[in-house]
Image (cartoon, rainbow, N blue to C red):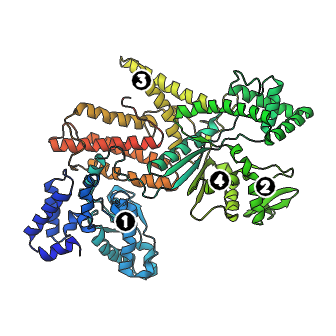
Amino acid sequence: PTLSGLSMRLFPSASLLLLLGTVATSAFAPSSVSMQRVAGRAAMAMRGRSSLLAFAPALHRSPQLSAASRNPSLVGRPRFCLQMSGGAVAAEKTVYVRKWLEKEVQDALVRAFGDDVKDASPMVTAATKPEFGDYQCNAAMPLAKTLKSKPRDVATKLCDELKTTIGDAFEDPEIAGPGFLNLRFKEDYVCDRIAGMAKDDARLGIPKVESPSRVVVDFSSPNIAKEMHVGHLRSTIIGDTLCRLEEFLGHDVLRLNHVGDWGTQFGMLITYLKEQGFGPDTGLGDLAISDLVEFYKKAKKRFDDDAEFQDASRKEVVSLQGGDELSLKAWSLLCEASRLEFQKIYDMLDIKVEERGESFYNPFLGEVIEGLKGKDLYEKSEGAGVVYVEGYTNKEGERMPLLVQKSDGGFMYSTTDLAAIRHRVEEEKADRVLYVTDAGQGNHFDQVFKVADSAGWVPPSTSLEHVPFGLVQGEDGKKFATRSGETVKLKDLLDESIRIASDDMKERMEADGKDFDAEMQDTARIVGLAAVKYADLSMNRESNYRFSYKKMLALTGNTAPYMLYAYARINGIYRKLGEEVDAVGADIILKEPTELALARHLLMLPEILSEVEQSLYPHKLCEYLFELSQRFNQFYENCPVSQAGTPELVNSRASLCAVTARAIKLSLGILGIPIVNRL
């Protein structure tokens, strides 16, 4: 029997129940919990609304309290952190509330209507408007037809069942309209969660996953001997953000840079460099990557116009692919020169990625072909090796092939991608592989994934996912290019954003009679780079977006400067409060609607992160951040902090400020943006 059940049988007296509740909660709850709140919960129990569950849900749910007593790290957690077998925290209820609610709704439906509805969707969503509460459940509407009942009658039965299981976190469900359920957090639950978040500076109470997955993220992928340009911006930024999120959640992440470092173009470029006096013996001297780009253009023209040069280039390719020492050395010089330039960009953007280019998979390409033949997938078409993928046909309805081998025996990008899949699955033991590339490669990856699956190289436990993104356009909606029509170099783009941010900040500081010192120069650099990142990430990645320095560097709206300013503003509040305020151990008091609204929004952060991990849409986190900053502004305008009236309320509001600041810092960190203390 549960402790609450025993309490009802052994202690029917209201006064004894109040005493038991006071003693139990004092013994097992964090010291910051006010006795007034304990008494309030006991009073609820006496009114018949619940048992000891009203104020000691951890006691009701689990007999493993001794484990918490032995482990101080568990004792300090909020009371709604339930103890499960093995001492694991029930994160669904304490953090990922929607997942917990979905299970409770499914169980309630079965209790109310039987096993026939066990597979019904719980249809739990975040509330669309504050007046609808925190969550909505729309399960009654589609079930009504199945059960041949009125939606409101279904909702009433579901409501009655839910009251018995979610009452420690939610007010009684409200039935709205024809049969929608509105679910609203209890104020005490919100207070406890905020208090718990305040005690966890680094993670805000968000646990790491108990069973980490091996996640491989393939992103950035520039080409050797070519400069990184605006086309690499989105893959690099989106890929890094997804890596940071997976790492924060506790997964084992392998960041891979699938650079274009192999192919026939290198024979052409090496041949031209040798003609210009550069090579394996002399090196590349002081040639910059921009010089290599020009050399590549000239080499391509020679290749198209000069048959003798064309023949020499092809022979160089054969030597390179055959492992000729001098050819490999010349190729290595090109790779190293490019690598140094790429790293300058990665350092600017604080990107960490492990290079594993196309050449890495070169030894495995023959095995791919043999593997396809062994599965009877490999066919010949006009002398080339192909695989026909189900669902792909031309306008005439004929099957369209995926080319995996040229008629001369050479290999294709698809062959390399198939080899990469085999290696990532078999050697890296990947559970999830993310390919962050432009939307134009969607069909390619869909075909490659299907071929790999047909060949038996992808176990059911492994997920291969293409993460497509749209184009970066100019403000006119056309190709983002220089005045001369050239593709914008990524370094030039980043430098320009830093320059504009610096000029703007310097002008504002001089107008206020302040010096634009070294600290503020560093701040301007952070703002300039953050603006580029945030502008990209705040857009639905599948959409094209127009690049505008003016919009992304604005101090208003959903921009990086606005979010950085929100964080710096909270720091300013702390400086005014001084060191006497206890923002960590405060008992949370939510008296005003705006502070309650802010607290409720803060509780949604873990679920937003979980949603982004599943959907791979970083803009959802940006939307959350923007709304958080707006709710904080409303709170700050209506709820004085230093002049709150009582020390308890000052501490409570200071704690709410602290949790908000940490939520902003944590979220911006996942987006790859460092915070600034002054702006």
Quarter location, residue 481: top right
Image height check: is 280 above or below 151? above
Relative image position of residue 567 (x, y in whole percent): 36, 36
Identify which residue is drawn at 73% across, 47% down.
362
Q: Which amino acid does label 3 sit on?
A: Met
Q: Nearer the viewer, mark 1 or mark 4?
A: 4
Please state which of residues 662 and 313 is positioned toward the viewer in this rendering.
313
- Residue for badge 2: 403
Q: Nearer the viewer, mark 4 or mark 2?
A: 4
- Going from N to C along the chain, the mark reached first, 3 or 1, is 1
Residue 381 placement, left or right of 504: right
Residues under labels 3 and 1: Cα distance? 47 Å
Image disc number at residue 520: 3
Residues packed near mark 1 inside 10 Å, few (<14), some (14 to 19) or many (20 plus):
many
Image disc number at residue 101: 1
Residues packed near mark 3 inside 10 Å, few (<14), some (14 to 19) or many (20 plus):
some
The answer, for residue 413, to whether it is visible in the render is no
Quarter location, residue 561: top left
Considering the numbered disc 1 on the image, is that residue within a helix, a strand or a loop?
helix
- Going from N to C along the chain, the mark reached first, 2 or 3, is 2
- Going from N to C along the chain, the mark reached first, 2 or 1, is 1
Considering the numbered disc 4 on the image, is that residue within a helix, a strand or a loop?
helix
Q: Residue furthest right?
A: 307
Image height check: is 500 above or below 59? above
Identify which residue is drawn at 49% across, 35% down.
531
- Residue for badge 4: 423
Relative image position of residue 659 (x, y in whole percent): 31, 44
Q: Which amino acid does label 1 sit on?
A: Leu
Residues packed near mark 4 inside 10 Å, few (<14), some (14 to 19) or many (20 plus):
some
Considering the numbered disc 2 on the image, is that residue within a helix, a strand or a loop?
strand
